[in-house]
Amino acid sequence: MSMLPLFSASEDAAAFIRRIVREETGVNLGPDKQYLIDTRLQPILRQYGLASHGDLVGKLRNGAARDVLRRAVIEALLTPETSFFRDRHVFSYLENLLLPSVIASRAAERQLRIWSAASSSGQEIYSLAMLLAEKFPQLRGWTVSLLATDVSERILAYARAGCYTRFEAQRGLTEEQRRKYLMERDGDFQVRKDLRQLVDFRILNLTAKWPPLPPMDIILLRNVLIYFNDETRRDIFAQAACALRRDGVLILGASETIVRSEFGFRPRLGTAPGVYERTDG
Ligand SMILES: C[S@@+](CC[C@H](N)C(=O)[O-])C[C@H]1O[C@@H](n2cnc3c(N)ncnc32)[C@H](O)[C@@H]1O
C-alpha cells in the first residue's frame, strides 16, 4: 500500500485546480507538478480552516470568497524563480552588442523602450536598469522606458517594492553591485529609489489580449514559455511581433526556442542563442 502525503490532493481536486490555473494563466501543471498542488496550497487550507483540497475545491466552486480564493490559489501555484543578471551571457550580449547597436540606431529620436514580460519579482528589469546606469551614461537626457509585467499581483507588489532578502540580493549581484545599487534595511536589501522609479510595473496576462503598448526596442520573454502549450506560445509570438518595433529584438530563456519562422520571428544571426528578430524586420 502506498503512503499518501498528508493533505495530498485527490485526483479530482488536483484536476480542478490544474484547470483553473490553465484557464487563467495558460500555465500547464503536469502530473510531475502534483507536489506543488500538495505543498503550496497548505497555507491556504490553514488560512481558511479547510481539511482537504476537496473542501478547497468546494469553496472554489461556490463559496462566498470564491474570486479571492481563486486568485490566491492561482498565485500560489505560479513559479516566480528568478535572479539578478540571470544567464550572464545574455547580459554580456546586451552590454557589448545589442544595446550599443540599438542606442546608435535611436540616436536621432533619443528614446529607448525595454519590456520584461513575465518579470516575476523584478530582478530582471532591475538588472537592466543597473546595466544602463553603469555602462551607458550617454543615455542621460534620453527617454528610457522600462516596463515590467507579470500576471501575479502578489509578485508584482514584491517587484515594485524592490526589497529582497540577503539570499536574493546575493544571487547574481557582485558585492560591489549590491553595495552600489541596493540599500540595506533591517536585514533586507532594497533597490535604490532612483532605479525603482525608472520601472513601470503593470499587470499583464500574456495569454489574454494585450493592452495597447508603445512599440518596444527589446522584449525579454524569458523562462515563461516553457509553461505554455504550442498554441498559447504561437498566440504570444503573434502578439510579441506586433509589440516589437520592426527592427526590435525578442530575447527568450535558455531552454526556449522558436523553431518555425511562421511564428513571425527568426534567430538573429551572429548573436547569443535565444535572440530573435521579426521575419519582416
Ligand atoms: C520563472 S519566472 C521568470 C522570471 C524572469 N523572466 C526570469 O527569466 O528570470 C515566470 C514568471 O511568469 C509569470 N507568468 C506565468 N504565467 C503568466 C502569464 N500568463 N502572463 C504573465 N506572466 C505569467 C509567473 O507569475 C512568474 O513570475
Image (cartoon, rainbow, N blue to C red):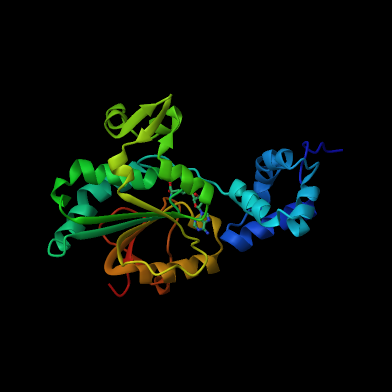
Q: Is residue 229 left or right of residue 194?
A: right
Q: What x and y, as percent, mark residue 173?
A: 34, 33
Asked where in the image residue 261 lies, by quadrant, the reply is: bottom left
Judge whether 255 appears above or below 259 on screen.
above
> The N terminus is located in which quarter?
top right
Asked where in the image residue 48 lies, by quadrant, the reply is: top right
Asked where in the image residue 181 lies, by quadrant, the reply is: top left
Q: What x and y, as percent, mark residue 211?
A: 43, 68
Judging depth in this view, the residue of 107 and 140 nearest the camera is: 140
> The C terminus is located in which quarter?
bottom left
* Residue that appears at 76% across and 59% down: 61
Judge whether 241 appears above or below 252 on screen.
below
Judge whether 86 appears above or below 171 on screen.
below
* Residue that appears at 28% across and 64% down: 248
Q: What x and y, as percent, mark residue 114?
A: 31, 56
**Count of labels in the image:** 0
Q: Is residue 218 left or right of residue 119?
A: left
Q: Is residue 152 left or right of residue 98?
A: right
Q: What x and y, as percent, mark residue 140?
A: 15, 49
